Image: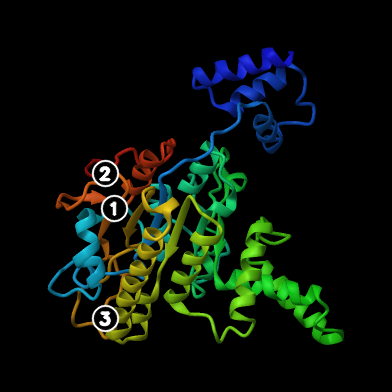
Amino acid sequence: MNPEERNHSVADASRLHLPRRTFLKGVLAGAGALTLGPDLLAVDQLAEKVALPKPDYRGPNIILVRFGGGVRRRETIDAKHTYAPFFCHELTKRGTLFTKMEIDSFQDINTSHGEGTLYLTTGKYEKFKDVTGRFLGARFEASVPTVFEYLRKAYQVPAHQTLIVNGEDRGDEEFYNFSNHHLFGARYRSNTLSLRRYKTFLLRRQIEAGKWTGKELAKKRADLEKMESIDYRHTEANGQGAELDGFWQRWREFYGETGLVNPRGDRLLTELTIRALKELRPKLIMVNYNDPDYVHWGNMTHYTRGVTVIDEGLRQLVATVEADPEYRDNTIFVVVPDCGRDSNPYVAVPCQHHFNSRSAHEIFALFFGSGIRRGVVVDKRVDQIQVAATLGRMMQMPTEFAEKRILEEVFA
Protein backbone atom coordinates (compact mmCIF):
# COMPACT_ATOMS: atom_id res chain seq x y z
CA MET A 1 0.00 0.00 0.00
CA ASN A 2 1.57 3.29 -1.08
CA PRO A 3 1.36 6.42 1.14
CA GLU A 4 -1.49 7.96 -0.87
CA GLU A 5 -3.57 4.78 -0.66
CA ARG A 6 -2.83 4.49 3.06
CA ASN A 7 -4.01 8.06 3.75
CA HIS A 8 -7.20 7.48 1.79
CA SER A 9 -7.85 4.27 3.74
CA VAL A 10 -7.40 6.00 7.09
CA ALA A 11 -9.73 8.79 6.00
CA ASP A 12 -12.31 6.26 4.82
CA ALA A 13 -12.12 4.46 8.17
CA SER A 14 -12.70 7.75 9.93
CA ARG A 15 -15.79 8.50 7.85
CA LEU A 16 -17.15 5.05 8.60
CA HIS A 17 -16.54 5.57 12.34
CA LEU A 18 -14.39 2.44 12.37
CA PRO A 19 -12.21 2.38 15.52
CA ARG A 20 -8.68 3.24 14.50
CA ARG A 21 -7.20 0.31 16.43
CA THR A 22 -9.52 -2.16 14.69
CA PHE A 23 -8.76 -0.69 11.29
CA LEU A 24 -4.99 -0.73 11.81
CA LYS A 25 -5.02 -4.32 13.06
CA GLY A 26 -6.84 -5.30 9.89
CA VAL A 27 -4.36 -3.47 7.69
CA LEU A 28 -1.39 -4.99 9.51
CA ALA A 29 -2.83 -8.46 9.46
CA GLY A 30 -3.43 -8.21 5.71
CA ALA A 31 0.17 -7.12 5.20
CA GLY A 32 1.55 -9.89 7.39
CA ALA A 33 2.94 -7.35 9.82
CA LEU A 34 1.66 -8.94 13.03
CA THR A 35 4.25 -11.68 13.11
CA LEU A 36 5.09 -10.86 16.71
CA GLY A 37 1.53 -11.23 17.96
CA PRO A 38 -1.17 -8.68 18.85
CA ASP A 39 1.00 -6.02 20.46
CA LEU A 40 -1.70 -3.44 21.10
CA LEU A 41 0.72 -0.72 22.16
CA ALA A 42 2.62 -1.17 18.89
CA VAL A 43 -0.68 -0.92 17.02
CA ASP A 44 -1.50 2.31 18.86
CA GLN A 45 1.93 3.71 18.05
CA LEU A 46 1.52 2.89 14.38
CA ALA A 47 -1.97 4.37 14.45
CA GLU A 48 -0.49 7.64 15.68
CA LYS A 49 1.95 7.66 12.76
CA VAL A 50 -0.49 6.95 9.94
CA ALA A 51 -3.53 8.87 11.20
CA LEU A 52 -4.17 12.45 10.30
CA PRO A 53 -2.63 14.88 12.82
CA LYS A 54 -4.83 15.67 15.79
CA PRO A 55 -6.07 19.26 15.94
CA ASP A 56 -4.83 21.71 18.52
CA TYR A 57 -7.25 22.36 21.35
CA ARG A 58 -8.63 25.90 21.31
CA GLY A 59 -10.84 25.80 24.37
CA PRO A 60 -12.68 26.42 26.47
CA ASN A 61 -10.17 25.76 29.22
CA ILE A 62 -11.73 23.90 32.13
CA ILE A 63 -10.95 24.33 35.83
CA LEU A 64 -12.71 21.49 37.66
CA VAL A 65 -12.77 22.23 41.39
CA ARG A 66 -13.49 19.37 43.76
CA PHE A 67 -15.14 21.18 46.68
CA GLY A 68 -13.67 18.32 48.56
CA GLY A 69 -13.27 16.54 51.74
CA GLY A 70 -17.03 16.10 51.46
CA VAL A 71 -19.32 19.06 52.20
CA ARG A 72 -22.99 19.54 52.99
CA ARG A 73 -25.30 21.90 51.17
CA ARG A 74 -26.05 23.68 54.45
CA GLU A 75 -22.53 25.09 54.93
CA THR A 76 -22.00 25.86 51.25
CA ILE A 77 -25.03 26.84 49.13
CA ASP A 78 -27.48 27.64 51.94
CA ALA A 79 -27.33 31.44 52.13
CA LYS A 80 -28.37 31.53 55.79
CA HIS A 81 -25.73 29.11 57.04
CA THR A 82 -22.89 29.21 54.51
CA TYR A 83 -19.21 29.34 55.44
CA ALA A 84 -18.37 30.06 51.78
CA PRO A 85 -19.72 33.60 51.25
CA PHE A 86 -17.85 34.33 48.01
CA PHE A 87 -19.03 31.10 46.45
CA CYS A 88 -22.59 31.31 47.75
CA HIS A 89 -23.33 35.00 47.32
CA GLU A 90 -21.22 35.96 44.30
CA LEU A 91 -20.16 33.02 42.15
CA THR A 92 -23.56 31.34 42.07
CA LYS A 93 -24.94 34.49 40.40
CA ARG A 94 -22.40 34.19 37.58
CA GLY A 95 -23.42 30.77 36.34
CA THR A 96 -25.77 27.79 36.51
CA LEU A 97 -26.26 26.19 39.91
CA PHE A 98 -27.62 22.67 40.35
CA THR A 99 -28.92 22.56 43.90
CA LYS A 100 -30.03 18.92 43.86
CA MET A 101 -27.16 17.02 42.36
CA GLU A 102 -26.86 13.58 43.96
CA ILE A 103 -24.69 10.51 44.10
CA ASP A 104 -26.85 7.52 43.25
CA SER A 105 -28.13 5.84 46.43
CA PHE A 106 -29.52 2.75 44.71
CA GLN A 107 -26.17 1.30 43.67
CA ASP A 108 -23.65 -0.42 45.91
CA ILE A 109 -21.07 2.36 45.83
CA ASN A 110 -19.20 4.42 48.40
CA THR A 111 -19.57 8.12 49.09
CA SER A 112 -15.98 9.14 49.64
CA HIS A 113 -13.16 11.19 48.18
CA GLY A 114 -11.36 8.91 45.76
CA GLU A 115 -14.60 7.43 44.50
CA GLY A 116 -16.18 10.84 44.03
CA THR A 117 -13.15 12.06 42.11
CA LEU A 118 -13.42 9.17 39.69
CA TYR A 119 -17.20 9.45 39.37
CA LEU A 120 -16.62 13.04 38.23
CA THR A 121 -13.79 12.34 35.81
CA THR A 122 -15.13 9.10 34.27
CA GLY A 123 -18.88 9.67 34.30
CA LYS A 124 -19.53 6.23 35.70
CA TYR A 125 -20.38 4.78 39.10
CA GLU A 126 -18.16 1.86 40.04
CA LYS A 127 -17.63 -0.29 43.10
CA PHE A 128 -13.93 0.34 43.49
CA LYS A 129 -11.49 -1.88 45.37
CA ASP A 130 -8.01 -0.91 46.46
CA VAL A 131 -5.62 -2.57 44.03
CA THR A 132 -2.94 -2.98 46.72
CA GLY A 133 -5.25 -4.86 49.09
CA ARG A 134 -4.50 -2.54 52.01
CA PHE A 135 -7.09 -1.96 54.72
CA LEU A 136 -8.90 1.31 54.04
CA GLY A 137 -6.75 1.81 50.97
CA ALA A 138 -8.09 3.97 48.14
CA ARG A 139 -5.72 3.11 45.30
CA PHE A 140 -8.34 2.72 42.58
CA GLU A 141 -8.21 2.03 38.86
CA ALA A 142 -11.13 3.16 36.72
CA SER A 143 -12.37 0.75 34.07
CA VAL A 144 -13.42 3.53 31.70
CA PRO A 145 -11.46 6.58 30.51
CA THR A 146 -11.17 9.85 32.38
CA VAL A 147 -11.94 13.21 30.78
CA PHE A 148 -8.18 13.80 30.65
CA GLU A 149 -7.73 10.75 28.44
CA TYR A 150 -10.64 11.74 26.20
CA LEU A 151 -9.12 15.19 25.72
CA ARG A 152 -5.62 13.99 24.93
CA LYS A 153 -6.86 11.35 22.51
CA ALA A 154 -9.04 13.84 20.64
CA TYR A 155 -6.63 16.78 20.54
CA GLN A 156 -2.95 17.61 20.45
CA VAL A 157 -2.60 18.37 24.17
CA PRO A 158 0.56 17.41 26.13
CA ALA A 159 0.36 15.71 29.52
CA HIS A 160 1.63 18.78 31.37
CA GLN A 161 -1.43 20.72 30.19
CA THR A 162 -3.84 18.19 31.70
CA LEU A 163 -3.29 18.33 35.44
CA ILE A 164 -4.61 17.03 38.74
CA VAL A 165 -3.63 19.13 41.77
CA ASN A 166 -3.60 16.79 44.73
CA GLY A 167 -3.34 17.14 48.53
CA GLU A 168 -0.39 15.82 50.49
CA ASP A 169 -2.63 13.67 52.69
CA ARG A 170 -4.27 11.86 49.77
CA GLY A 171 -1.42 9.62 48.61
CA ASP A 172 -3.73 7.02 47.12
CA GLU A 173 -5.08 9.66 44.76
CA GLU A 174 -1.64 10.51 43.39
CA PHE A 175 -2.16 8.33 40.32
CA TYR A 176 -5.76 8.79 39.25
CA ASN A 177 -4.26 10.04 36.00
CA PHE A 178 -5.55 7.33 33.71
CA SER A 179 -7.84 4.32 33.49
CA ASN A 180 -7.06 0.71 32.65
CA HIS A 181 -9.25 0.87 29.54
CA HIS A 182 -7.48 -0.82 26.64
CA LEU A 183 -8.27 1.94 24.15
CA PHE A 184 -6.98 4.72 26.40
CA GLY A 185 -4.83 4.32 29.52
CA ALA A 186 -1.29 5.48 30.16
CA ARG A 187 -0.72 6.72 26.63
CA TYR A 188 -3.20 9.54 27.27
CA ARG A 189 -2.56 10.12 30.98
CA SER A 190 -2.60 13.47 32.71
CA ASN A 191 0.00 14.67 35.20
CA THR A 192 -0.11 15.52 38.91
CA LEU A 193 1.03 18.45 41.01
CA SER A 194 1.43 17.71 44.70
CA LEU A 195 3.83 18.14 47.57
CA ARG A 196 4.70 14.44 47.29
CA ARG A 197 5.74 14.96 43.69
CA TYR A 198 7.89 17.94 44.71
CA LYS A 199 9.58 15.97 47.49
CA THR A 200 10.36 13.18 45.05
CA PHE A 201 11.81 15.64 42.53
CA LEU A 202 13.86 17.35 45.24
CA LEU A 203 15.32 14.15 46.66
CA ARG A 204 16.25 12.93 43.18
CA ARG A 205 18.04 16.20 42.42
CA GLN A 206 19.86 16.22 45.77
CA ILE A 207 21.16 12.69 45.20
CA GLU A 208 22.28 13.59 41.68
CA ALA A 209 24.13 16.62 43.08
CA GLY A 210 26.11 14.42 45.49
CA LYS A 211 24.69 15.86 48.69
CA TRP A 212 25.24 12.58 50.63
CA THR A 213 27.78 9.80 50.71
CA GLY A 214 28.21 6.39 52.32
CA LYS A 215 25.45 5.03 54.53
CA GLU A 216 23.47 8.25 54.39
CA LEU A 217 23.46 8.11 50.59
CA ALA A 218 22.27 4.50 50.69
CA LYS A 219 19.43 5.51 52.99
CA LYS A 220 18.43 8.40 50.77
CA ARG A 221 18.42 6.14 47.72
CA ALA A 222 16.17 3.72 49.59
CA ASP A 223 13.88 6.61 50.52
CA LEU A 224 13.70 7.68 46.87
CA GLU A 225 12.95 4.14 45.75
CA LYS A 226 10.10 3.97 48.26
CA MET A 227 8.68 7.31 47.07
CA GLU A 228 8.92 6.26 43.44
CA SER A 229 7.30 2.89 44.18
CA ILE A 230 3.97 4.65 44.75
CA ASP A 231 3.85 4.72 40.96
CA TYR A 232 3.58 0.95 40.75
CA ARG A 233 2.71 1.16 37.04
CA HIS A 234 6.08 2.86 36.40
CA THR A 235 4.78 5.72 34.29
CA GLU A 236 7.29 8.19 35.72
CA ALA A 237 10.49 6.18 36.00
CA ASN A 238 12.55 9.23 34.98
CA GLY A 239 10.46 11.92 36.60
CA GLN A 240 7.48 13.87 35.30
CA GLY A 241 9.09 15.31 32.18
CA ALA A 242 10.96 18.49 31.33
CA GLU A 243 8.02 20.86 31.84
CA LEU A 244 7.19 19.57 35.32
CA ASP A 245 10.86 19.37 36.29
CA GLY A 246 11.15 23.02 35.36
CA PHE A 247 8.04 23.83 37.36
CA TRP A 248 9.43 22.12 40.47
CA GLN A 249 12.83 23.76 40.05
CA ARG A 250 11.20 27.19 40.04
CA TRP A 251 9.15 26.16 43.11
CA ARG A 252 12.40 25.12 44.80
CA GLU A 253 14.07 28.44 43.99
CA PHE A 254 11.12 30.37 45.41
CA TYR A 255 10.16 28.33 48.50
CA GLY A 256 13.40 26.51 49.24
CA GLU A 257 13.82 22.96 50.44
CA THR A 258 12.65 22.95 54.05
CA GLY A 259 8.89 22.70 53.52
CA LEU A 260 8.47 25.30 56.28
CA VAL A 261 7.87 28.22 53.93
CA ASN A 262 5.36 27.05 51.32
CA PRO A 263 1.61 26.90 52.11
CA ARG A 264 0.10 23.65 53.38
CA GLY A 265 -3.27 21.93 53.13
CA ASP A 266 -5.71 23.38 50.63
CA ARG A 267 -3.84 26.69 50.56
CA LEU A 268 -1.01 24.72 48.98
CA LEU A 269 -3.38 23.46 46.26
CA THR A 270 -4.46 27.02 45.49
CA GLU A 271 -0.84 28.14 45.16
CA LEU A 272 0.06 25.17 42.97
CA THR A 273 -2.91 25.85 40.72
CA ILE A 274 -2.17 29.55 40.34
CA ARG A 275 1.44 28.81 39.43
CA ALA A 276 0.35 26.08 37.02
CA LEU A 277 -2.03 28.46 35.25
CA LYS A 278 0.74 30.99 34.80
CA GLU A 279 3.60 28.64 33.93
CA LEU A 280 2.15 25.46 32.39
CA ARG A 281 -1.00 26.91 30.76
CA PRO A 282 -3.24 23.85 31.29
CA LYS A 283 -6.28 23.20 29.12
CA LEU A 284 -7.91 20.99 31.76
CA ILE A 285 -7.01 21.09 35.45
CA MET A 286 -8.71 19.48 38.45
CA VAL A 287 -8.14 20.91 41.94
CA ASN A 288 -8.82 18.30 44.62
CA TYR A 289 -9.49 20.38 47.72
CA ASN A 290 -9.88 18.29 50.88
CA ASP A 291 -9.47 20.34 54.10
CA PRO A 292 -13.08 19.84 55.33
CA ASP A 293 -12.22 16.17 55.85
CA TYR A 294 -10.22 17.13 58.95
CA VAL A 295 -13.56 16.98 60.75
CA HIS A 296 -12.70 13.29 61.29
CA TRP A 297 -10.59 14.55 64.19
CA GLY A 298 -13.90 15.31 65.89
CA ASN A 299 -14.03 19.10 65.88
CA MET A 300 -16.77 20.75 63.82
CA THR A 301 -14.66 23.87 63.34
CA HIS A 302 -12.13 21.81 61.37
CA TYR A 303 -14.89 21.26 58.84
CA THR A 304 -16.27 24.78 58.69
CA ARG A 305 -12.79 26.28 58.55
CA GLY A 306 -11.96 23.97 55.66
CA VAL A 307 -14.99 25.23 53.75
CA THR A 308 -13.81 28.81 54.29
CA VAL A 309 -10.30 27.98 53.06
CA ILE A 310 -11.73 26.55 49.83
CA ASP A 311 -13.91 29.63 49.41
CA GLU A 312 -10.86 31.87 49.64
CA GLY A 313 -9.04 29.60 47.22
CA LEU A 314 -11.86 29.99 44.70
CA ARG A 315 -11.62 33.76 45.05
CA GLN A 316 -7.91 33.62 44.22
CA LEU A 317 -8.37 31.26 41.27
CA VAL A 318 -11.10 33.42 39.77
CA ALA A 319 -8.97 36.54 40.20
CA THR A 320 -6.04 34.81 38.49
CA VAL A 321 -8.16 33.84 35.48
CA GLU A 322 -9.78 37.27 35.22
CA ALA A 323 -6.34 38.93 35.16
CA ASP A 324 -5.09 36.71 32.33
CA PRO A 325 -6.17 37.76 28.78
CA GLU A 326 -5.77 34.24 27.37
CA TYR A 327 -7.89 32.63 30.08
CA ARG A 328 -10.37 35.40 30.90
CA ASP A 329 -12.88 34.84 28.09
CA ASN A 330 -12.08 31.22 27.33
CA THR A 331 -12.38 29.40 30.67
CA ILE A 332 -15.16 27.55 32.46
CA PHE A 333 -15.13 26.74 36.17
CA VAL A 334 -16.94 23.60 37.34
CA VAL A 335 -17.30 23.31 41.12
CA VAL A 336 -18.60 19.98 42.47
CA PRO A 337 -18.11 18.15 45.80
CA ASP A 338 -16.68 14.65 45.88
CA CYS A 339 -19.41 13.63 48.34
CA GLY A 340 -21.78 15.03 50.94
CA ARG A 341 -21.75 14.48 54.71
CA ASP A 342 -23.96 13.06 57.40
CA SER A 343 -26.44 15.41 59.10
CA ASN A 344 -27.02 13.34 62.25
CA PRO A 345 -26.57 15.77 65.19
CA TYR A 346 -26.19 13.04 67.82
CA VAL A 347 -23.03 11.23 66.68
CA ALA A 348 -19.80 11.72 68.63
CA VAL A 349 -17.87 12.77 65.51
CA PRO A 350 -19.95 15.10 63.34
CA CYS A 351 -20.33 15.14 59.56
CA GLN A 352 -19.26 11.62 58.60
CA HIS A 353 -19.74 10.30 55.07
CA HIS A 354 -19.03 6.55 55.19
CA PHE A 355 -22.37 5.26 56.45
CA ASN A 356 -24.54 5.72 53.36
CA SER A 357 -26.76 8.34 54.95
CA ARG A 358 -29.01 10.36 52.69
CA SER A 359 -27.18 13.66 53.08
CA ALA A 360 -23.87 12.00 52.19
CA HIS A 361 -25.37 11.50 48.71
CA GLU A 362 -26.63 15.08 48.44
CA ILE A 363 -24.27 17.51 46.71
CA PHE A 364 -24.47 20.40 44.21
CA ALA A 365 -22.68 21.73 41.15
CA LEU A 366 -21.92 25.18 39.82
CA PHE A 367 -20.82 25.96 36.25
CA PHE A 368 -19.71 29.48 35.39
CA GLY A 369 -17.56 31.17 32.80
CA SER A 370 -17.38 31.49 29.03
CA GLY A 371 -20.68 30.62 27.36
CA ILE A 372 -22.45 29.46 30.55
CA ARG A 373 -25.92 30.73 31.40
CA ARG A 374 -25.81 33.24 34.26
CA GLY A 375 -28.09 33.45 37.26
CA VAL A 376 -29.76 30.10 36.62
CA VAL A 377 -30.83 27.83 39.49
CA VAL A 378 -31.81 24.26 38.59
CA ASP A 379 -33.78 22.53 41.34
CA LYS A 380 -34.42 19.19 39.65
CA ARG A 381 -32.50 16.05 40.64
CA VAL A 382 -29.38 15.37 38.56
CA ASP A 383 -26.49 12.92 38.92
CA GLN A 384 -22.82 13.49 39.72
CA ILE A 385 -21.79 11.27 36.80
CA GLN A 386 -23.44 13.66 34.33
CA VAL A 387 -20.52 16.06 34.78
CA ALA A 388 -18.11 14.10 32.54
CA ALA A 389 -20.36 14.06 29.47
CA THR A 390 -21.19 17.73 30.04
CA LEU A 391 -17.46 18.51 29.95
CA GLY A 392 -17.23 16.43 26.80
CA ARG A 393 -19.90 18.57 25.14
CA MET A 394 -18.15 21.76 26.23
CA MET A 395 -14.77 20.60 24.98
CA GLN A 396 -16.16 19.01 21.80
CA MET A 397 -14.71 15.60 22.49
CA PRO A 398 -16.44 12.21 22.58
CA THR A 399 -16.98 10.61 25.99
CA GLU A 400 -18.33 7.35 24.66
CA PHE A 401 -17.93 5.26 27.83
CA ALA A 402 -19.41 7.85 30.22
CA GLU A 403 -23.02 8.39 31.29
CA LYS A 404 -24.78 9.75 28.19
CA ARG A 405 -27.01 12.33 29.86
CA ILE A 406 -25.62 15.83 30.05
CA LEU A 407 -26.63 18.83 32.16
CA GLU A 408 -28.58 20.61 29.41
CA GLU A 409 -29.35 23.71 31.47
CA VAL A 410 -25.71 24.75 31.46
CA PHE A 411 -25.68 25.74 27.82
CA ALA A 412 -26.82 29.22 26.84
Label 2: how many Cα within 10 Å (few below 14, some 14–19, many 20+): some
- Looking at the rendered image, the quarter that the C terminus falls into is top left
Q: Which amino acid does label 3 sit on?
A: Pro
Determine which residue is flagged by label 2: 407
Identity of the residue drawn at 21% across and 50% down = 374
Secondary structure found at label 3: loop
Query: SS at mark 2?
Result: loop
Residue indicated by mark 1: 367
Question: Do labels 1 and 2 touch, CB within 8 Å?
Answer: yes
Residue 286 vs 145, above or below: the answer is: below
Estimate the spatial distance between the alpha carbons at disc 1 and disc 2, rounded to whole Å.
10 Å
User: Which one is nearer the viewer's eye here, 388 or 155?
Assistant: 155
Q: Which residue lies furthest to the right in this view?
A: 214
Amino acid type at circle 1 is: Phe
| Residue 300 in view | yes
Instruction: Say the numbered circle drawn on residue 350.
Output: 3
Q: Is mark 1 on a helix, strand or loop?
A: strand
Question: For this rendering, which residue is in front, 354 or 54?
Answer: 54
The residue furthest left is: 80
